[in-house]
């Protein structure tokens, strides 16, 4: 039986294909799968590239840091796994030149350093960086600008480090792993690791820090990391990119979320297209299946035949769609090459699996229930056309679809909160759409007597095909809303990025500004034309107890907590909340709170230490013990590049304690001389050059912008397919009706106007509902998921209404145009309703 | 006379529910049809002819009573069982032809043979189309054929499995008089040649008169006409 069903299914499929019957279903599915895999390929390439770039801030894919030299066996194991390794050792020491000396951080690196990213060097202090793939050769050193400025020397001069003398061959401008933090206050000097023993600086007991760096294929690193984590000694710290650079991570996170969202949109559009196509497929096959049964086929047989057909269509669509997605994505990347500052790595094959899985689960969810219905159509339909299949059980009609969407949505976002908001919002929107659709249909029925003949025909159609009209309003509305929503969110995201990374973003940070030199310092910046940002006081503090319990006796599950509890912390006090900070718990202090023992902490800090509002924290600040109550938790947008602190106190509490000031400022490229002069004039001020980090962040955001734009193009494609599929679904009925009307003497123009009237009404209402839905969803998404400010936009209402009406009317007219061109007789004969 | 009975209705009743309470469409119908016989059931629109045909062919189930088709009690068979019996012993011709629009004339005729798993479907179907005079139209789709031609394809499809009983529901109802007469000729000719039992439902008395026996259906009841 099965074999016969397979054979017949295949044969029927071939015949239906020749007759042009399957074209639209295949097209809808192909474009949907194409959009989805295309998005998948793009996201894959961009995230690979972003991950590689993000790893540059570690100078590796993975780092092991320790206070004693890490065991050789780690490197041996890594090399066995075809990973590349490099070593660095840092030690604080005084560097001499003539009678000048300066404490500096000596960083000795092996020949393979850096494994990711490159080193920026220049021939002058604070000069424009040229990139080098490796560090200094033995016998040479690369001091940074601050060190050279402090010692008053230049390239070509000699410096003494421990027992050795070295020639200064370059000025160190940037290294990939310098980070954005202020852990290292001392100027630094890069040297070759082979030279380190001859300096005799490393003695037993000397305070050095060592790092072993690893890089290689993604899979190899992913396998190596758990091994290293298991094998490492206590006190050896494993770092990957997640904790290395909050600025870059923040941008990557938001881009990633948008792209997940975009993939989701493609999935949903795909689902609507499949559902509409499957409906049409079933409607067109009711008669055939009833006939097959009359001719003696069993229910199982007809079901198998339909399943075979649909499965083959899915397979073909998945293959064609994936190929199409790949090609379009390749073309997009080439066409928009100018937008990117770097080449993208080729995609891996994961999106292909995504394409197949999506095609299959969407078909299973959205096409299987109608197919089951199809197999239940009674044979008696051949005699009585009004006999359809019995109505399905509700769980059968919606269960698989809900399951398929739920599965895909979760699979794409993998975030429970986002997932729940999304599913709840979507369900609500569908219910509202269906309700509003029903209302419109009722309203349209009442309108019939008051409009002209075309409109009466069109509007009458709406109320006559009640269920059909509601389904179409839901499909159109959902499609338009998703596209509008994506447009809104895309705009918000792009605007926010452009705003957060203006060309004059602070690229230098200055800390340790003594209070008594503060005014002179700012005057100097002013006269040199540098644009300064907010200035904040700063003081070192150490956390000593939480809720009265000494910190040494506490253990933290979160490795970040371990770090926060052991390290000295820079803290500040501040009256106003910066606009790059957002309160996520508790409240920011008012003027009445100034001087009270309160503290505001960042959410990383709160999570790391497991704190909640009302917890008491004890700090040792410059020898004084301060106990304060946690009054608020802030989420900080690190990519704002403004001075920000994990721990902030209200004003009037610590003002008497001796602290220093910090600020950030923007200097144009080529202002190196000004900075060198500043270092000489204010020797106690530490200068941090963030240009390199900014370049990295800008490049990440470039890619994110590119991804956002091109993914948008893809989803537009998918949206148009949905429209086409939705219109096609009623095409057969329209063919028959328009033939009938024309037989009764209606002109083609009258019928056309009727069809236009019907689709325009559908489009207007769908557009109105879609704009409402998109505004609400856009607000929620911007606030909860992407953390960008939401700008209310009247345009989406205009676009939603006009665009919806135009798009739906035009595609309705396009799809039914051929119907109107045929003489009525052939329509009446060829396809009964 | 000991002729084989191929179709028998015993106290057949079909009721459906309506807003005004249960409605009896087929009311206590009893009859027998012997092999090779041709029987016409005539009656006005709404008399219950099509419902009776559906019950006799096992397309619908009776409220009470039973139908014996080729010796098997249809009421003892489930839907798939009835489908199997139809595949083996029954052919159909419908008023609105019921050809699969996506299949050519030849493929439509091959369909019942393929359903029965016959490997010689193509030559047998070609021969059947030749018998109805459509040798030159085998590759045409239904929409490319006239009404008369479509019904010829349907007749070829009905006879191609050499059924024991052929049910025809207003076979000329959608055709003009001349074409209708030709189709009727073809139907009776093939029926005579293949010794099939013919059960014909129509409101056309002229057509009905060509059958050996005629019953009249009125308000659900059947009386000899």
Image: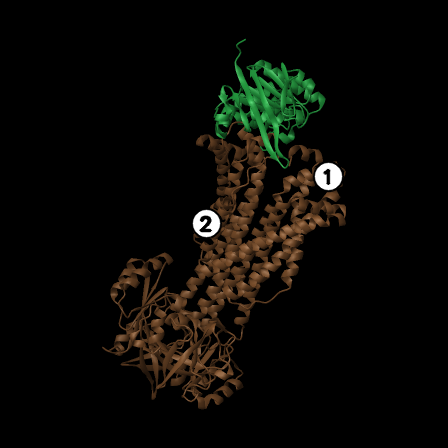
- Residue A370 versus residue A210: which sits nearer the camera? A370
Position of residue B65 measured from the top left corner of the image (x, y, whole percent): 54, 24
Is residue A723 shown above or below A153?
Answer: above
> Chain letter of disc 2?
A
Hey, which quadrant is residue A749 in on the image? top right
For mark 1, give the secondary structure: helix
Instruction: Kindly give the residue lying farthest to the top in the view shown.
Output: B1
- N-terminal of the pair, mark 2 or mark 1, is 2
Which mark is nearer the camera, 2 or 1?
Answer: 1
Q: Which chain is green?
A: B
Position of residue A95 measured from the top left corner of the image (x, y, whole percent): 33, 83
Please tell me how crowded label 1 is: few (under 14), some (14-19), or many (20+) other residues with Cα within 10 Å.
Answer: some
Q: Is residue B157 visible?
A: no
Q: Which residue is mark 2?
A: A352
Position of residue A21 measured from the top left corner of the image (x, y, whole percent): 58, 37
Is residue A823 shown above or below A774?
Answer: above
Q: Which mark is residue B170?
A: none
Q: Quadrant of the C terminus of chain A?
A: top right
């Amino acid at each position: 039986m099965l074999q016969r069903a397979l054979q017949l299914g295949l044969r029927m499929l071939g015949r239906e294909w020749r007759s042009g019957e399957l074209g639209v279903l295949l097209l809808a599915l192909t474009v949907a799968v194409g959009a989805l895999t295309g998005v998948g390929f793009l996201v894959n390439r961009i995230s690979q590239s972003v991950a590689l770039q993000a790893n540059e801030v570690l100078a590796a894919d993975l780092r092991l840091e320790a206070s004693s030299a890490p065991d050789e066996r780690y490197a041996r194991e890594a090399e066995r796994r075809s990973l590349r390794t490099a070593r660095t050792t840092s030690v604080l020491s005084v560097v001499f030149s003539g009678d000048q000396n300066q404490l500096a951080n000596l960083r000795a690196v092996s020949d393979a350093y850096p494994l990711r990213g490159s080193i920026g060097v220049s021939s002058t202090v604070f000069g424009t960086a040229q990139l080098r793939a490796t560090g200094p050769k033995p016998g040479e050193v690369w001091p940074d600008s601050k060190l050279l400025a402090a010692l008053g020397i230049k390239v070509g001069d000699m410096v003494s480090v421990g027992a050795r003398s070295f020639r200064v061959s370059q000025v160190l401008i940037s290294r990939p792993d310098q980070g954005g933090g202020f852990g290292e206050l001392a100027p630094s000097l890069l040297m070759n690791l082979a030279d380190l023993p001859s300096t005799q600086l490393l003695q037993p007991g000397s305070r050095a820090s060592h790092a072993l760096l690893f890089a290689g294929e993604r899979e190899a690193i992913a396998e190596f990391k758990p091994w290293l984590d298991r094998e490492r000694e206590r006190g050896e710290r494993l770092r990957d990119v997640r904790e290395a650079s909050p600025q870059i991570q923040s941008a990557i996170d938001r881009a990633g979320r948008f792209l997940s969202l975009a993939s989701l949109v493609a999935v949903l559009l795909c689902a609507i297209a499949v559902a509409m196509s499957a409906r049409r497929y079933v409607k067109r096959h009711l008669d055939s299946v009833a006939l097959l049964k009359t001719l003696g086929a069993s229910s199982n047989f007809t079901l198998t035949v339909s399943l075979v057909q649909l499965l083959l269509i899915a397979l073909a669509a998945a293959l064609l769609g994936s190929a199409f997605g790949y090609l379009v994505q390749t073309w997009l990347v080439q066409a928009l090459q100018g937008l990117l500052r770097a080449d993208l790595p080729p995609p891996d094959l994961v999106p292909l699996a995504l394409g197949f899985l999506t095609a299959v689960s969407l078909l299973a969810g959205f096409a299987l229930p109608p197919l089951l219905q199809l197999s239940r159509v009674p044979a008696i339909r051949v005699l009585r056309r009004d006999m359809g299949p019995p109505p399905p059980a509700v769980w059968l009609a919606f269960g698989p679809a809900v399951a398929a969407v739920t599965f895909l949505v979760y699979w794409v976002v993998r975030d429970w909160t986002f997932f729940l908001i999304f599913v709840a919002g979507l369900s609500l929107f569908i219910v509202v759409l269906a309700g509003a659709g029903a209302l419109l249909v009722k309203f349209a029925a009442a309108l019939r007597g008051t409009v002209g003949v075309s409109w009466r025909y069109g509007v009458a159609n709406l109320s006559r095909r009640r269920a059909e009209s509601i389904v179409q309003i839901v499909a159109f509305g959902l499609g338009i809303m998703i596209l509008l929503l994506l447009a809104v969110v895309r705009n918000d995201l792009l605007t926010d990025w452009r705003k957060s990374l203006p060309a004059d973003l602070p690229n230098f940070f200055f800390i340790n500004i003594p209070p008594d030199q503060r005014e002179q310092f700012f005057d100097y910046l002013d006269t040199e034309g540098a644009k300064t940002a907010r200035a904040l006081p700063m003081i070192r503090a150490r956390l000593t107890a939480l809720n009265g319990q000494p910190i040494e006796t506490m253990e933290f599950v979160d490795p970040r907590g371990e770090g926060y509890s052991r390290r000295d912390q820079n803290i500040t006090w501040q009256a106003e909340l910066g606009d790059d900070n957002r309160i996520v718990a508790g409240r920011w202090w008012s003027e009445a709170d100034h001087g009270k023992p309160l503290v505001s902490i960042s959410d990383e800090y709160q999570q790391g230490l497991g704190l909640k509002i009302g917890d008491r924290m004890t700090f040792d600040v410059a020898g004084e013990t301060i106990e304060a109550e946690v009054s608020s938790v802030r989420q900080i947008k690190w990519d704002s590049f403004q001075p920000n602190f994990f721990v902030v106190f209200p004003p009037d509490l610590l003002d008497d304690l001796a602290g220093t000031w910090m600020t950030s400022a923007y200097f144009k490229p080529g202002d190196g001389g000004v900075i060198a002069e500043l270092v000489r004039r204010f020797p106690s001020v530490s200068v941090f050059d963030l240009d390199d980090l900014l370049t990295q962040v800008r490049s990440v955001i470039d890619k994110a912008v590119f991804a956002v734009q091109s993914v948008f193009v893809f989803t537009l494609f998918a949206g148009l397919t949905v429209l086409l599929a939705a219109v096609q679904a009623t095409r057969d009925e329209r063919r028959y009706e328009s033939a009938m009307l024309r037989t009764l003497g209606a002109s083609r123009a009258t019928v056309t106007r009727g069809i236009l009237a019907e689709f325009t009404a559908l489009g207007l209402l769908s557009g109105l509902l879609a704009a409402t839905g998109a505004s609400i969803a856009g607000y929620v998404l911007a606030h909860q998921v992407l953390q960008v400010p939401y700008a209310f936009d009247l345009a989406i209402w205009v676009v939603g209404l006009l665009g919806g009406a135009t798009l739906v009317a035009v595609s309705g007219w396009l799809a039914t145009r051929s119907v109107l061109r045929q003489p009525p007789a052939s329509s009446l004969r060829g396809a009964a309703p | 006379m000991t002729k084989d009975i191929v179709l028998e209705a015993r106290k057949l009743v079909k009721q459906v529910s309506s807003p005004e309470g249960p409605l009896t469409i087929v009311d206590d119908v009893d009859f027998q049809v012997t092999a090779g016989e041709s029987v016409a059931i005539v009656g006005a629109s709404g008399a219950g002819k099509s419902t009776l045909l559906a019950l006799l062919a096992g397309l619908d189930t009776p409220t009470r009573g039973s139908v014996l088709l080729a010796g098997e009690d249809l009421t003892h068979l489930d839907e798939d069982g009835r489908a199997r019996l139809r595949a083996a012993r029954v052919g159909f011709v419908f008023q609105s032809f019921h050809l699969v629009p996506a299949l050519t004339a030849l493929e439509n005729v091959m369909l019942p043979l393929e359903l029965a798993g016959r490997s010689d479907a193509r030559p047998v179907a070609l021969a059947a189309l030749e018998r109805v005079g459509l040798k030159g139209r085998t590759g045409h789709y239904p929409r490319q054929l006239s009404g008369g031609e479509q019904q010829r394809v349907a007749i070829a499809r009905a006879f191609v499995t050499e059924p024991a009983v052929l049910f025809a529901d207003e076979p000329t109802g959608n055709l003009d008089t001349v074409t209708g007469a030709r189709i009727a000729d073809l139907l009776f000719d093939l029926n005579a040649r293949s010794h099939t039992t013919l059960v014909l439902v129509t409101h056309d008395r002229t057509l009905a008169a060509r059958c050996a026996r005629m019953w009249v259906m009125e308000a659900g009841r059947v009386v000899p006409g």
